[in-house]
């Protein structure tokens, strides 16, 4: 069996043409079973998109957007991963790994820390890449000038420091 290598192309939101923008949005929504809202998509805008195409169709997407996470009283510039999705018929073929390769490239070059709110199912993949569950207290800016705490059910389970790209201690 021949293994195909997938590489994600990085494109800033401002550089997405209309067709790519809508194709990515539609693919992500379909990958989430239609439960990916317009608000969810808005959270994925304003940063870098990792995209993988096959024969002109987008088959995988992830975005890295800037967030401020407050850790021990310090606001950290965070590359936050949003909208990670692989088209259902392409799952299990390494596309999520290719998306994360691209996302981590952006995080290493531009941010103090990387983070994602992962599903329980994805935790093993992140752990294999060296990401660690976040066990400390965490705040983020919810509204201008107003810090908020994640709901107890939210798990910001995978974080890495861009400083030598080694894990922060919570």
Image (cartoon, rainbow, N blue to C red):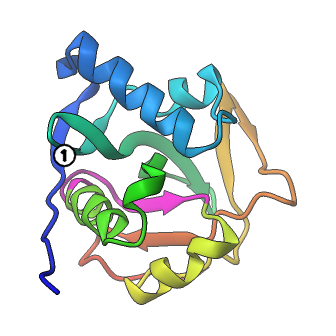
Image x and y of residue 53, in percent: 20, 43
Q: Residue at x 28, y 38 (%)?
A: 58
Q: Is residue 96 left or right of residue 164?
A: right
Q: Is residue 144 visible?
A: no
Q: Residues within 10 Å of mark 1 (few under 14, many from 20)?
A: few
Image x and y of residue 33, in percent: 65, 41
Q: Residue at x 24, y 78 (%)?
A: 164
Quarter of the rendering occupied by the N terminus:
bottom left
Q: Of 67 and 41, which appears nearest the observer? A: 41
Q: Is 89 located above or below residue 157 in the figure?
A: above
Q: Quadrant of residue 90?
A: bottom left
Q: Which residue is mark 1?
A: 54
Q: Is residue 73 left or right of residue 77?
A: right
Q: Is residue 149 visible?
A: yes
Q: How many marks?
A: 1
Q: Residue at x 70, y 78 (%)?
A: 135
Q: Quadrant of residue 137?
A: bottom right
Image x and y of residue 128, in percent: 42, 88
Bounds of the magenta span? 106-117
Q: Of 121 and 90, which appears nearest the observer? A: 90
Q: Is residue 140 left or right of residue 42?
A: right
Confirm whether the magenta stretch covers residue 112. Answer: yes
Of all residues, the one furthest to the front in this rendering is 1
Q: Is 101 located above or below residue 59 in the figure?
A: below
Image x and y of residue 114, in percent: 41, 61
Confirm whether the magenta stretch covers residue 21. Answer: no
Q: Residue at x 51, y 44 (%)?
A: 68
């Amino acid at each position: 069996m021949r293994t195909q290598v997938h590489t994600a192309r990085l494109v800033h939101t401002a550089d997405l043409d209309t067709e790519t923008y809508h194709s990515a949005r539609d693919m992500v929504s379909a990958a989430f079973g239609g439960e990916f809202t317009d608000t969810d998509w808005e959270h994925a805008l304003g940063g870098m998109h990792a995209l993988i195409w096959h024969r002109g169709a987008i088959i995988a997407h992830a975005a890295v957007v800037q967030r401020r996470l407050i850790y021990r009283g310090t606001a950290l510039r965070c590359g936050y991963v949003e909208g990670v999705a692989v088209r259902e018929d392409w799952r299990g073929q390494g596309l999520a790994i290719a998306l994360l390769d691209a996302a981590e490239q952006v995080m290493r070059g531009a941010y103090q820390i990387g983070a994602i709110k992962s599903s329980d199912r994805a935790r093993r993949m992140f752990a294999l890449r060296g990401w660690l569950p976040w066990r400390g207290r965490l705040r983020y800016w919810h509204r201008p000038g107003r810090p908020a705490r994640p709901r107890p059910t939210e798990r910001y389970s995978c974080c890495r420091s861009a400083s030598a790209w080694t894990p922060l201690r919570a």
